[in-house]
Image (cartoon, rainbow, N blue to C red):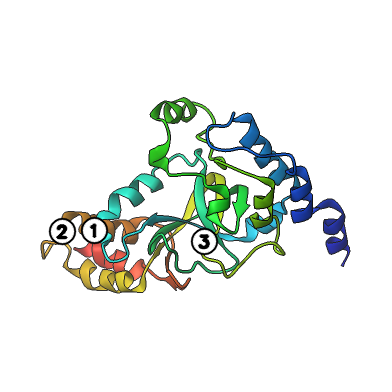
Amino acid sequence: MIRQLIQQIILEDLEGFKARTAEISYGRGASKDIPRSLKQAWAAEADHEFFKSLTKVHWIAGMPKSPYRVFEKMNSFLNASGKDEISTMGYIDKPSVSQWGEFGVMVQGRTTLAANDMDAISSGYYREIDPGEIEKYSKTSGLPRRASKFSPEKAKGFILDAESFGSQYLGNELIVDNWRPTGLVAPLWFINDLKKNVPVLGKRKLEQSYENLVKLFVTSGLPVYTTNGNKKDMSPLRQSLELT
């Protein structure tokens, strides 16, 4: 009770965010100071303990039935520094399905902006970023992600705490900084394929990128989850792979 009372006094949540952003309005191409002020307003009102509690997944591929091309994306992400801000989806408990595909990486990190609808943030795609911008920030604290446009009426779609979190909506977006991978996510049919294919690695020729993906899931050392949040034990497959 006391803790809840303190939170109510200190955290002004969504209404406070609306008040702070009432005069903020911009479109694409705005000075970086303006979207930065939006993130500052969000940080001042957000319940950061709540965001620490969420399960966050960076979805790697929108190719549900083609794991063969996922390896390069996932391998590159796992080898990234964690300094660049990334886009994730947030879940109250277990990861769930995503419109972005069935393969993803669970991460822990500091949430710097969040909305129930990714269109409220419109942070863009990595391929749209100026290469010069990427090189510039790679030498410092990492590449930031910002809302590309904002108007006061959009404020109601942002997440500030548990009360404003639309837990059933599958299109939310959490921008996360200083992150590290904590697990891999894949569909159950792929997990079942692992059980079939690990024993034959080195004995039967598989498509190379698929073989690499199989090895990544088995040897990464990270926990593996299905898209409905069930954790799968990789140790028998790891032992089988070591024997091949």
- Please state which amino acid type lies under the numbered disc 3: Gly
The tag earlier along the polypeptide, 3 or 2, is: 3
- Location of the N terminus by quadrant is bottom right
235 lies left or right of 241: right
The tag earlier along the polypeptide, 2 or 1, is: 1
The vertical placement of 179 against 205, above or below, is above
- Please state which amino acid type lies under the numbered disc 2: Glu
- Which residue is depicted at the point 27% across and 61% down? 67
Numbered label attached to residue 33: none
Picture mark count: 3
Q: Is residue 176 visible?
A: yes
- Which residue is depicted at the point 35% across and 73% down? 188
As helix, strand or loop, the secondary structure at mark 1 comes to: helix
Q: What distance separates the C-alpha of mark 3 from that of mark 2?
A: 33 Å
Q: Which residue corresponds to mark 1?
A: 68
Q: Return the residue nearer the eye: 91 or 30.
A: 30
- Which residue is depicted at the point 31% across and 60% down? 63
The vertical placement of 34 against 82, above or below, is above
Q: Which residue corresponds to mark 2?
A: 207
- Quarter where residue 202 is shown: bottom left
Q: Return the residue nearer the eye: 178 or 63.
A: 63
Q: Where is residue 191 drawn, in percent x and y?
A: 32, 70
Q: Where is residue 105 drawn, in percent x and y?
A: 43, 56
Q: What distance separates the C-alpha of mark 1 from that of mark 3?
A: 25 Å
As helix, strand or loop, the secondary structure at mark 2 comes to: loop
- Which residue is depicted at the point 25% across and 63% down? 241
Marks 2 & 1, CB-CB < 8 Å contact: yes
- Quarter where residue 91 is shown: bottom right
As helix, strand or loop, the secondary structure at mark 3 comes to: loop
Q: Which residue corresponds to mark 3?
A: 171
Marks 1 & 3, CB-CB < 8 Å contact: no
Marks 3 & 2, CB-CB < 8 Å contact: no
